[in-house]
Image: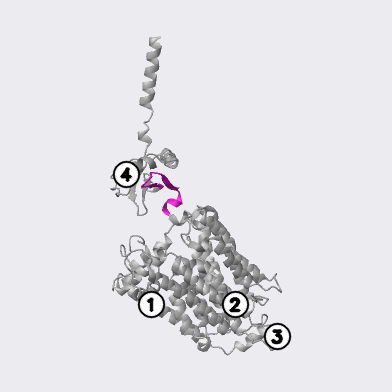
Amino acid sequence: MKRLLLTLCLLLLAGALLTPSAHAQQPAPPASYPKAPEVFSVSGREAYLVAREEPEVARLTAELGRLTTREELRDDGRWQLGFFDKDDEEVVQVHVDGGTGDVLETWTGVQVAWSMARGYEGQFGHALNAPWVWVPLALIFFLGLLDWRKPLRIAHLDLLVLLSFGVSQIFFDSGEIGVSAPLAYPPLLYLLGRMLWVGFRGRGEPGLRPSAPRMFLIVVCLFAIAFRVTLNLTDSGVIDVGLAGVAGAEQITSGEPIYGEGLFPEEVPTGDTYGPANYAAYVPFELALPWSGEWDDLPSAHAASLFFDIATVFGLFILGLRSRGQTPRSGSDPTRELCPQRLGLILAFAWLTYPYTTYALQSNTNDSLVAALLVWGLVALGSPVGRGILVGLAAMVKFAPLALVPLYAVGRRGLSDRLDGWRPSWTPLRPVLLAGAAAAFTIALMLAHPAIDPGLATFYERTVESQLVRDSPFSIWGQVDGLDAIQGFVLILAGILAIIVAFKPGRRTTAQLAALAAAVVIASQLAVDHWFYLYIPWFCGLVFVALALPVISDTMRVTQRREPS
């Protein structure tokens, strides 16, 4: 019996010696623990001991081997524990309450590096995301633009598709980006096809002709302006894009370079990824409302975003006033006629009530600046120099509008019409050359500052190159491996489209040109690694123009032959 007990003890001892200890399977503790504030009842070491017991930490430790730990003290009263694999990649992040020691959040996968993928409540739209705000706004947008006499118009389907981005956003707000990103592609593809059809073939029907009386449109527009301004000033936030714009403007006013490592605040180290026109646009607002140097309320970013938004509304209204509409005849139905004043109201109403223009305003970004420049480029179609300058500025805010330079340069007459059977003549090409030269001069002027300091090589590295090598889970290209060839093909098709629309159709109205511009923008967005709802304003204003302004028939286009632009 004693021998049996001795044998069992030896076996147990051998098993204990051969089995890896529990300590060996735990993550390595931090090299040092930050000093806990007096208000904390949980020390850094205690937070580590709590975090290492999380199931996800144990699971990845078993899969990847022993992890290393780094600990940070956050400003919101919590400890942040990051667990890193042997390649120094953070694979788990745990947040521990500094007062109670409870685990508040645990993140793995892409949600470790991308906090915007975690579904934090109100991180972009704030109060706008509440159903009691979003749903009524969407209903006002759709029902206010509805023609109740012909409810089955395809233009009404277009409005529903514009609103259908909300299906994707529901999953995004829940932190399910594996679902939200793919769901953004059906509406993008539909709008691409629809804009190509309008651009090359015309609408085949009057487009947006809401039944709502003019006074209703006016009252709602005024209310919407007041609502958007109030919401922006009382319940909106400035995301990193707005901070980057203000910080870059401060660099300009201080006579410092915009581009280079370590020039921007630590909260936005890659804030110099945009074009120089972006930072220049923030300069007057930063001078009027100087930046404190902290990521606070940033009043200059609010002021800039509100200005960009109102500038877009005003541009759309002017486009309607300058349309080739018909003044209603006495006794006619004003909702059916192409009255310029009414068209201006329709375009302003569409922008002011569309939820995703408010969404961008609530985030105080530079996206409405792109929209404003492209819309005003349409307003300036009669001036080759004017439209060239505006599209050049848009290309120097964010680089995607570079693809629109050929389209805006040719204006209402494509190259197939201007070349007159491939026999070049100076007179019809003169506006194209003027617009192209104006765009090129504007781009060169914007590049002068970074060319002097720190140099175009650094500028390229911090902007174009950084975006080309950027990985993002906010697209199917970033979520699914092995799609590089397909993505490259889509990018090539987008480039080919940008060239084709400079040639065909030979004659195009403002509505058709807006549709072609929207198609080029959407095509470029389909090819990028990073896509987000804030990019919708880049093209939605152009879509509204394409759906509302008159598309002149072939017989009426003959009257445009004398137009030099």
**Residue 435 versus residue 197 in the image, above or below:** below
**Mark 1 surroundings within 10 Å by alpha-carbon count, few (fewer than 14), some (14 through 19), many (20 or more):** some
Q: Earlier in the sequence, mark 1 or mark 4?
A: 4
Element on which disc 3 rests: loop
Q: CA distance from mark 3 to mark 4?
A: 78 Å
Q: Position of residue 143 (x, y in %)?
A: 63, 70
- The kind of residue on which mark 2 rests is Leu
Q: Is residue 138 left or right of residue 274?
A: right
> From this viewpoint, is residue 483 visible?
no
**Residue 443 versus residue 9 in the image, above or below:** below
The quadrant holding residue 26 is top left
Q: Position of residue 439 (x, y in %)?
A: 44, 79
Q: Earlier in the sequence, mark 3 or mark 2?
A: 2
Residue denoted by label 2: 217
CB contact under 8 Å: marks 1 and 3: no
Segment tinted magenta in the rendering: 91-113
Residue denoted by label 4: 43
